Amino acid sequence: MCDDKTGQNQGLPVFTAGAQHTIQAIIGNSSDLLAGALFQNLPPIEVQCNAYVWNTFLSPSFALQEMSALDAPNAQFTYKQPGLVAKSYGVVGFRFDVDQVFKGLTAAMKALNLTPQQLGAPDVDSWMKGVNAHACVKVLVRANEFPDFPNGPFPSDMNVPTADRHIAQRNLAGFDMTLKGAKKLQWQNFMMSQAFEGANTLAIDAPVLPNDGVRYYLAVPTQMFERHIGKAGPHRGFEVVTDTASKPFPDAVILRRTTPEARLSIADHAKERFFGMALGVEWDPTVLARARTLGDISVAHHGRDGKVVGGFTLRPQVR
């Protein structure tokens, strides 16, 4: 969950400059044995939390400071839980300083020498300050269990939370779908990455939103489209359009989804592992006003075997 300094849960807020938040995660011991150092001189349960540029699978990251330290300025990046009794749970916490995270993620992206061609924007700062540039967080728990006990590794952040119980992910952003006024088109920047060798695909899923009132778009920097997407085909259910009301970044090819089953093929791009993209959602307020619930909007990242290996979810919020 995301809390303010008074501990009040804010749901999925838009994180503003200068704000301070906390990331709290529940960890558990599902075995019949004691875990951690308490009483038996065993290694503590170690937990880390990384912030990432909003992404489909993996992106440049920045480690958050843990909250167990009494001296906040000297806090470390690994939370140490002394122990958990059998079949019990504990709460770990990390500081999410918006300015610090923004600077850390910007530095991580610059260290990769991402080019304007990969970002569709003049530089990293422009992309990060672009439309709805948010973060996501992953919580990693050191195994400390057989057969690696007592020095099990942290899981790779390449792992998928649904397949590895030592990792969890939360995307931190609200998506404001205001129902008043004229037709809206809103963009959400994200980072595309190479998950595995070979072609990857993206799919947009919004099972609750009415198809007659919402359109979905993907924006790709022009050179990235030409190198990795234009020749990758077939692109089932996507068409290139030029009539959108706006673009998320200046240099972009815009694709509109034409069927709910649409799949966008992306060729192997290991040599340019990361590049910027954006999801666009256009809606008719009069249609959405009649909807009982909006539901989530998800972008699923499929690997070479067709299985979902990552992605992100937008949770529409209405004013």
Image (spheres, grey):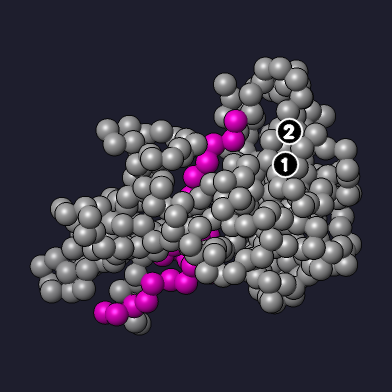
Q: Secondary structure at mark 2?
A: strand
Q: Secondary structure at mark 1?
A: strand
Q: Does the segment drawn in magenta span residue 259?
A: no
Sequence-earlier tag: 1 or 2:
2
Looking at the image, residue 121 lies above or below residue 8? below
Give the residue at mark 1.
280
Kindly identify the amino acid type of the residue bearing the numbered disc 2: Leu
The secondary structure that most of the magenta stretch takes on is loop
Kindly identify the amino acid type of the residue bearing the numbered disc 1: Gly
Tell me which corner region of the image, top left, top right, bottom left or bottom right, holds residue 282. top right
Tell me, yes or no, if residue 312 can be seen here: no
| Mark identifier at residue 206 | none
Point 81% across, 48% down: residue: 254
Q: Which residues are magenta?
A: 149-176
Which residue is nearer to you in this view: 144 or 253?
Answer: 253
Looking at the rendering, in which quadrant would you find the C terminus?
top right
Which residue is nearer to you in this view: 228 or 28?
Answer: 228
